[in-house]
Amino acid sequence: MKDVTIYTTPTCHFCKAAKAFFAEHNVEFINKDVTTNKEFANEMINKSGQMGVPVTFIDNDMVIGFDEPKLRELLGIK
């Protein structure tokens, strides 16, 4: 199983879509809400250089936004 971490905000439509995708495919993930934890926000910016969400890390691979084809590829979902 791969380590999946997603940086999100509660109002982000694409964040909700990504989390729903993970749930639909039984992918366990760690959700880091950048609005409630400044450390999570700084961590996301330092790792990705991005200010927007979602930012997902699957092991050492980064996915910006809700890029379903890339998520499927990295997770081995057909």
Image (spheres, grey):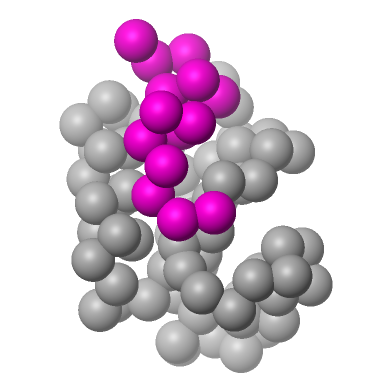
Quadrant the N terminus occupies: top right
In the image, what residue occupies the spot 51% across and 64% down? 7
Of the pair 50 and 56, the residue shown nearer to us: 50
Q: Is residue 16 left or right of residue 39?
A: left
In the image, what residue occupies the spot 54% across and 54% down? 64
In the image, what residue occupies the spot 74% across and 70% down? 49
Q: Is residue 66 left or right of residue 25?
A: right
Image coordinates of residue 10 in percent, x first then y, are 29, 76
Viewer can see residue 52? yes
Count of numbered badges drawn on the protein? 0
In this view, the residue farthest toward the right is: 46
Q: Is residue 77 left or right of residue 74?
A: left
Res 23 → quadrant: top left
In the image, what residue occupies the spot 70% across and 75% down? 45
Image coordinates of residue 65 in percent, x first then y, are 45, 55
Image coordinates of residue 32 in percent, x first then y, are 50, 67
Magenta stretch: residue 23 in it?
no
Res 36 → quadrant: bottom left
Image coordinates of residue 14 in percent, x first then y, are 30, 60
Q: Is residue 24 left or right of residue 62?
A: left
Magenta stretch: residue 72 in it?
yes
In the image, residue 2 sits, relative to residue 50, either above or below, namely above
Quadrant the C terminus occupies: top left
Q: Which residues are magenta?
A: 64-78
Viewer can see residue 43? no
